[in-house]
Structure formats: C-alpha cells, structure tokens
Image (cartoon, rainbow, N blue to C red):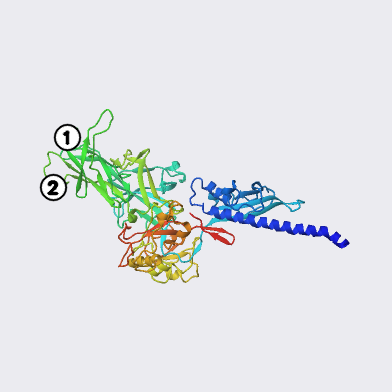
Amino acid sequence: MIMTVGFFPVLVLLTSFVIDIGNWFEHDRHLQMQADAAVLAAAGEFATPCESGANQAIKDMSRTYGGLEPPADDTFNQQVGGTALEDVDIAFNSRTWPGQAAGPVDDTVVEGEPCDTGMIDVKLTESDLPWFFSAAQVDFINVQARVAIRRAIRAKGVLPIGVPDVKPKKARAVFVDESKAPGGYVLADTALCTGATSGGRTAYSNAGSADPGCPSGVGPLPVRIDARDIGVRIVLSGSDSTTCGDPLVECYDAETGSKIGLSHIRGWTDGTAASATAPRARDVELVGGTCPDGYFVDVSADCTVKVIADVDFGVADPSTVGATLAAKVGNKSYPMTYLPFDPATGKGGVWESAPGSPVPVPGAGGTVTVDLKWGTKGVTDCNKRADSCTFTAVQRVFSGTAARSGPIRAVKVSEGVESGTNSFKRCVDGADTTCVHDLVVTIGIDAALDGVAQGPDDPPVTLRLDSGNQTQALDCDVPGYDVELAEGCEIEYQINTGEACPAGTTALRKGPEPYTCVGVETGSFTNKIAKGLNTRILGVDKPDTCTSPNNWKSFFTDADTPGEVTSQELAGDPRTVQVFLTPFGAFSGTGGTTVPITEFATFYVTGWTAQGGVREPLHGQRRRPHPRRRRLHRRPLRQVHRPRQQRRGRR
C-alpha cells in the first residue's frame, strides 16, 4: 500500500507525459500538413512572368489552404484540437519563424516576394500549446514547406527541334551605298543597345542617353547622304562579333547576294526642271496607310502606304502643262493628286496618293519598289523616250519575311523628333556639310522566350523544319528523323555552360553523356516530319481519326466551363512536347555542325502540315501554317520542388 501510494503521483505524471507528448506530436504533424497544403496550393498561382497582384494571390491561397483565413467556411486544414486562429501564425520567404527573431535561422531561403524569388517558402508556428494539466506549455511548434521554380538542366526524350532564343548579345545598324558592289559600300555604322520590352517586342536603338541599355559614347549617328540609294542593314549576333558570315551572326536583309537593307533612304539632288517635258523628282516619302509604317512592315496581311512626292515640272502650277503623276509598282499604276502650295500653312506644292489609290504592300512580300510615272501635254509617246516617262526606284518598302528579316518586327529611321526620315537632299560636293544628318535607328525584335503564353491568341513560334541549310531540325539520336520525332531523343542532354561544341555529331558522340551540344540535321526528310508527328501525337503515321484534338484554346477557358482542360491534363497531352533552346544565330551556317544547348522548354503543338502522302486527319479542314513552317505555342518548362515531393504548377 505504501509503495502504491508513493508510486501513484509518478504514474499520474507519466500518464500526463504520454498524453501531452502525443498531443504535441499530433499538433506538429497536422501543422506540417497545413504547411504542405499551403505551398502546394500556392504553386498553382505561379506564372512567368507574374501578373499584377500575383504575389498577393499566392499568399492568399497559402493562407486559405494553410487553415489561417477566417471565417472558417473559407479555409481548409485548420489546426486540430480547437486551436484558436490567433495561436497559429505564418511567415512567407522569411529566414526566421513568426515571433522568434532570436530563434532558429534558415539560410536557404531567398527573402522577397514570391514572384521575385521564384519560390514560396512557408513557415508556420503554433504558440503556447498547453499541457494536459496546464502545469507547463509548449512555447513554439515550428514547421516549414517550400515550392520553388527550378531550371531543368538535364533531359531525355526531348523532341529533335532547336528553337533559337531571341537574345542577341550585340546588335548593329549599317548604312550602305547600295550602288556599290559587292554587298554595298559602308557609309556609317553604329551599335544598337537594348531598351525596354513592351508589346511582345524588345527595342534596340542608338538613341544614347534616352536608351537605358546604352553605354556611354553611343548616340545619334552622323550620316553623310552622298548616295542615291542607301540601305539600312541590321546585324544581330549571339557572340561578340558583328561581322556577317561569322558564327552566330545574322545579317538582314539576309537574302543571298542582296545589296539592300531592311530600310531604304533616298538621296535626291536639287535643281530646276529644264521644261515640262523634262521634270525632276526631288523629295519622295512614304507614309503608312493601313500599314503601320511606310518603309518596313511586318504583318501577315496585305496593307497599304501613301506616296508623297515633290516633282518639279518647270512651272508653278503643274496643271497648266497637263501634268499627271502616278505611283507605279510592277505593271500597275496608282494615281496621285497635286496639292497646291498654301502660303497660310506653308504646306503643299507636292503630289500625294489620290484618295482610294494607295500603294498595296503584300504581307511577307519582301521588297516592294516604287516608281513614279509622269506625263504632260507635250509628251505623247513615252515608249520612245529614254526614261520612258518614269522615275525608277524612287522609294522602297520592305515587307518582312522569316527568311530575310528573321525576328525583326520594326525598323525606323529618325532625326530628332522626326520619324520616317528616309529622304534627304544629297551632298553637292566634298565640302558640303548640309547633307550630314544625325540619325537614330530603332528596331523591334521578338521578345525572348522567357515567359509562358498568356492567352489562346498569343502568336505561335515559327520553326523551319524543311530540308536544306539553316534548318532547325536536330540530329539528337541514331535513328531516322521520323523516329526521333515520334519517340524523342534517348540520349541524355544537358545545358551548356560555356563548353566548346565539336565540329560534328561523330566527334560529339565520342564523349560521355550527357552532351551539352546537339547536332544539326541535314538531308531531305520533309515527309518524315508529318510521319513522325502523326506517330507521336496521333498514334500511327497515317491515322484515320484525330485521337488527340487541339486543346490549346480549351486550356484558357473559365474553370467552370464544360470541356475546360486543366494544367495536369495539358501536361499529359501528347501535343505537349519538350524541345531544345539554342543561342541566337545558331542556325545561321550550313548543316552538319553542332550547336550549344542553352535551355530546355516545353511547347504545345497546335498543327502541322502533311507531306509525301502522310496526312494529318483534319488536313485541309482548317487553316494551316505555311507548308514549310511548323507551329508550336510557347510554354517554357517549369518544375516545382519541395523535399521528396514534386508538383507541376497550373500556369
């Protein structure tokens, strides 16, 4: 009895200890589950780049699924045991736990907003958990969970396609006298520096201090106008070189043997017309009609420009000699109207495209040369004249194409506040300085592939997979190209961190995996493209039905809409493919070489064309891309991590 009485307090203490320790562990386990749910739910709110309010949305989602947001009906996973909400606190991307500035420190976290740091680190603390008999309490229970956006550095099963990332290391504008051969005589050139990115384009210019990306010494370029036709060429380079023909250097206009530029400057001479039958064309300008610019356009649809010309017929009023003028492109003429000079406004005295008769510019049409066709009462047969009553090649529009202007979407020449300054009076002699103009060239190119698609109508990425030189098809494995497309590359590849690439695939494959470079495919395999994609996406090389429809637009519909496709379903869609990213200019040379791997990215295939009798089931039933273009919508690869768990973010 004495022993029982003496042991009873110890028994009560041990019982309390067991109950309280079990309760402590139960609270700790559940709190960890809350932290896990908080970060995994928040992962679905990540987007690259983050939109306005994304940081707050990420935190709100963490609080909701971490059981922290009142009222209780709007939260999930609240702490067990009726724990008051105020006893559980949360810290985001913090090195310390809530209320414990002098407590443990986490040196692995990157402090800052989730969008800026690429992670959502949640630290939860439950404070003052009472013991069963309230004789003591647990001051703090600390748990942690993290989801982070991580870069994929190795991959297998990648599609044998290289997508050059539009991140030129250097850009340059070169003014050339197009009459000089070969390739034109360089009159002046200047570096173009990176400016702001907007509207899906990155701007480069030599504006100087106005351009935040320009170093000192770069500014408006003095150009001496002493040639009739001056072309503005653009050089984009993925290396330190800006010499055309060097590796990773692309020069536009890129047409073989071309002596012209992407923008044209007219150099005209002054003087008085000898008579009405010997007129003189001076200043000739182009302004955008339905085209966004008069000298360089990059639109797939046809558009128009207006012509404004100063033509001297030797009289004050051209109508007195029956003068007529028309813009001519090819064999078609477009009438122009004379606008008399108005002393009150100081304007007029020029010819302008007549209403309803602008000059048409075909989409992706390349060079469009504009002539001026004139006539007077004193000229009855232009066919017998040496000049055929025509001022030839007085101006030019360049309609961008993938082959000749690449990623360039805009080219403008300006002087001061004046843009579209593409017509100047030529120098009289070597001592003339009035013909020197300080010019600024501004270009807009495709933005780099550093973000996810924001909507179903985002422009697709255009790929060249046809045979011949400058193809973007890659030789990543031993089988034929159709097999590589269907099955992916079995060889493991890794991001290149500066290693030199071997001269060819034979030399490359003598080394151990993973390879940091990949070979460029050569030869004719056009029909293999459709065969490989049919097999990969539709199951067989010549399918009769579409077993994997295009779900791209469905992914962006409202979550409550029937037929909406989730990110998990899109990830498992066979149209979702992983490809190689390569440096800008990687495909500027001939085939048979190898190129470095800069990134891995995930794209969604929205369509492809049929060749060689191998057809896609819906071929011909909806609009297709150009027969020599394949389309992929950009959706870069992202991975989210926490210890021993992985989860794919929604966007």
Placement of 340 over or under 615, stated as above or below: above
Q: Nearer the viewer, residue 156 or 437?
A: 156
The extreme left residue here reads 380
Residue at image location 54% in from the left, 46% down from the top: 56
Quick one: 94 or 207, which is closer to the camera?
94
Q: Is residue 111 left or right of residue 395?
A: right
Q: Are marks 2 and 1 in contact (CB under 8 Å)?
A: no
| Helix, strand or loop status at disc 1 | helix
Instruction: Measure how far apart labels 2 and 1 are at the Cα level.
Output: 23 Å
Residue receiving disc 2: 383
Question: x, y (%) of residue 549?
Answer: 38, 60
Q: How many neighbours does mark 1 have within 10 angstroms: few (below 14), some (14-19), or many (20 or more)?
A: some
Residue receiving disc 1: 319
Q: Position of residue 416 (x, y in %)?
A: 38, 38
Q: Quadrant of the N terminus?
A: bottom right
| Residue closest to the far right | 2
Sequence order check, earlier mark of 2 and 1: 1
> Residue extending furthest front?
1
Judging depth in this view, the residue of 264 and 272 nearest the camera is 264
